[in-house]
Amino acid sequence: MEEEYFKENLTDREKETIKPYFSSVERNVFVLTNLPEVIKGTLFSRYSRSDKGARRLLLDEFIPNKDVAAAMGNATNHEDQILAINRAEDFYQRILVGYGDDSVAELAGVHIACENISSIAGDLLTDSRIGISPLEKSARYILFDKQVNGRYLWYRDPKIMASKHARLYEETMDLIFSSYAKWLPIVQEHVKKVTPKDPEATDRAYESATRAKACDILKNLLPGGRLTNVGLYGNGRAFEYLLTKIYSSNLEEGRQLAKEMHEELAKVIPAFVKRSQASEYITGTKETMGQYSGQFHKEVAEETPYIRLIDYDKDGEAKVLTMMLFPYSNMTALEISSKVANMALEGKKKLVKDYLSKRRNRRDKPGRALENIYYTFELCANYAIYRDLHRHRQLSQERQQLTANLGFDTPPELAEIGLESDYNEVMKKAKQAYGEISKDFPSEAQYVVPRGFRMRWYMKMNLREAHHLTELRSIKQGHPDYRKIAQQMRNLIAEKHPALVEYMMVDMNEYALPRIESEKRIDQKLAELDKRGNQNAEMSK
């Protein structure tokens, strides 16, 4: 029940004026609605340094400004509203100038869509650690076997297409996509043959699960130049830095993408992205660090895939146990650590059990004590695995440039179907094309490299992050390739700190048709919705 000791003194007319902009004009908790993002952010910025409530602030300081009022929706058309937002820039700046804190820009959020970009450009968009939430078109659930206007959906890089490599690039990309299109129905039929339909599964669930499995098998054929769509939600501060990074890209596609995003974001959050530009620090560092290439490059040879634990906190277990107790004690961390050091092994195991064993599933996040120990992994694995694990943006991770030099993985199912040699031949032709194009365009040559080719990257994470990654990426419906990586991570940590992984909920099993149980659950939900809809229809008669 809400307290009555304070109520904003709003007249009926004032309430009517601001009603479109708040989910409630009476309650102490309410949502801002129907306001441009810059105005939301500016209102909350002012809110933090005023004794007025948000509704009174809007009435007293925002609505009286005619440009702001127009930007809020009182303009006669959309063009006038955009113009009003631009004209209101001075108003925003007068409020923001008193803060001197970039965090103000975190109060304005925007959804933006970037369509028909390459997967390589998609990596640039999804690299931000905080402030941006991206979603990309999935190669697991979307088929890439269609042509539009007689052309497969791959990125035609202007540099390559204007060069002597244009024909080779085009022929190689078309070969990759035509092979994918030709093999997809063959692979799905094989999946159905080796995993007959479960009597409890509907035709819809079975068809979806077998199609997803077929896509899983063939998605490593898709190249870095595959066209994709990426939707992002983020705040102004995050977009400002994201634009700065993409403006500093080696790729013309990235720089052009930054320009187009900047133009669109400036229509809704102009005050928060106005400083975005290429960073001399980023571009200069790339250039100077590249000068070390002679000393730190070697003759390239194919490598066997691996994951290695190359560094870990050797004293981490004691740190974790100390911080498990710290919030529930009145002693200093050093005093607790001293007592922990003298605990018997059984006592330490019981402490870990009491801290972690009550988790019901992976959505019960383990406590922050696990953030006090770190592990660094180096991986050499296919690009598709990197793209899936890259989503764990909170981790410290960086990759070497994608090439066709470290070898590629061949899905084992293709040998059973009789497509292994055909697949390997396509991959070899892609490697040859990469070798030729990279002589002149080393960055742009990434577009022709299929996902099955290997690359190196590292991932540094604390134990809490390791719980999240290994538990999520080992779930039954996950791709077999990254499920194995998650399982290996868990085992490598267990070799160093076995007591700390005992309650990691990592699925170590293997599955023939991993999506089928998820599809069954979807069917159950659809049936419940249909039942509810029928009941409502009967009640309305």
Image (cartoon, rainbow, N blue to C red):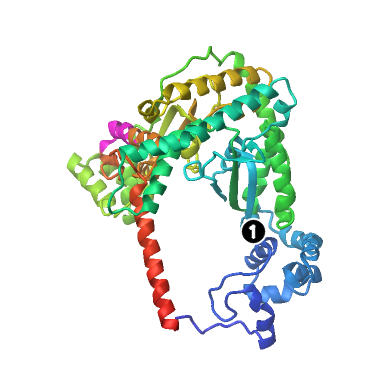
Name the residue: 50% across, 41% down: 139
In the picture, measured across the screen, residue 247 lies left or right of residue 511, that is right
Q: In this view of the protein, which residue sits in the foreground, 303 or 208?
A: 208
On whether residue 512 falls in the magenta region, the answer is no
In the picture, measured across the screen, residue 347 lies left or right of residue 111, that is left
The main secondary structure of the magenta stretch is helix
Name which quarter of the figure residue 176 lies in: top right
Q: Is residue 423 above or below residue 51?
A: above
From which residue to which does the magenta span run? 490-498
Residue that label 1 marks: 108
Residue 362 visible in image: no
Name the residue: 37% across, 52% down: 203
Instruction: Say what amino acid the circle numbered 1 marks.
Output: Ala
Q: In this view of the protein, which residue sits in the foreground, 381 or 141?
A: 141
In the picture, measured across the screen, residue 262 lies left or right of residue 289, that is right
SS class of the residue under badge 1? loop
Name which quarter of the figure residue 287 lies in: top right
Residue 515 visible in image: yes
Q: Position of residue 220 (x, y in %)?
A: 48, 32
